[in-house]
Image (tube, rainbow, N blue to C red):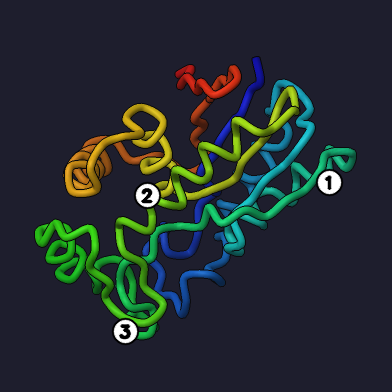
Amino acid sequence: MKRVWVFRHAESLSNAGGKTLDPEGIPLTEHGLRQARNLAWTLADPPNRVVTSPFRRAIDTAKPIDARHPEAINEVWPIQEFTYLDPVSCVGTNWADRKPRIDAYWANLDPAYVDGEGAESFSNLLIRARAFIKGLTELEDDLTIVISHGQFMQAAKLMALRPDISDRTAMSLFIDRQLRRPFSNCERMALMVDGDKITIAD
């Protein structure tokens, strides 16, 4: 039985309501940097492998873990956050500015829709989530730490529980769960991997 602990990144500028330039380069806040350090020091066991998304806020959250456990293998996987609005159109905005477009996107409930260059369809998010789940079953490590993003974690959880669900039904369930119970910064989703079977432990 292998353990995979998936954490949402620490508090970012976007989480704190700040205006941002691009999805990939959003930094952590000072509070987020403290959260990242605390996370590294509260891990109960040393990881064999540390996996992050390619986005800055995930990489920076993992840095204190890397410093404390330099023996761990470090990898970057395509487990970045779901970018469903055209990034160019969002430059210099914050979450409140984007709220009308966010509401319209989810009300449309079209998993194939792509908002513009650099945006991703919900169906593609599910492809990445399924690939992530499959990748976990191929790991041989006792403990893998993953630093990812709230919406990606929600999609991965859904794919672990209901891998054969249709994309449209998944989209409906996803936004319902995201509104009711989003992952908090540095919150853990603990997975147990036994062969091809993945169980959510908490």
Give the residue at mark 1: 67
Classify 71 as above or below 33.
above
| Rendered residue at 67%/55% (across/down) | 76
Which residue lies under the disc numbered 3?
89
Q: Residues within 10 Å of mark 1 (few under 14, many from 20)?
A: few
Residue 91 falls in image quadrant: bottom left
Q: Is residue 2 left or right of residue 9?
A: right
Mark 1 and mark 3 in contact? Answer it, CB < 8 Å: no
- Above or below, 16 relative to 42: below
Q: Secondary structure at mark 2?
A: helix
- State which quarter of the image contains the N terminus: top right
Q: Residue at x 53, y 25 (%)?
A: 190
Residue 77, how many percent across, how many down? 62, 53
Q: What separation in Å lies between label 1 and label 3 (alpha carbons)?
A: 37 Å
Seen in the image, is 55 located left or right of residue 18? right
Q: Are marks 2 and 1 in contact (CB under 8 Å)?
A: no
Q: CA distance from mark 3 to mark 2?
A: 24 Å
Q: Quadrant of the C terminus?
A: top left
**Closer to the eye: label 2 or 1:** 2
Instruction: Tell me which corner region of the image, top left, top right, bottom left or bottom right, holds residue 104.
Output: bottom left
Q: In this figure, what is the number of numbered marks?
A: 3
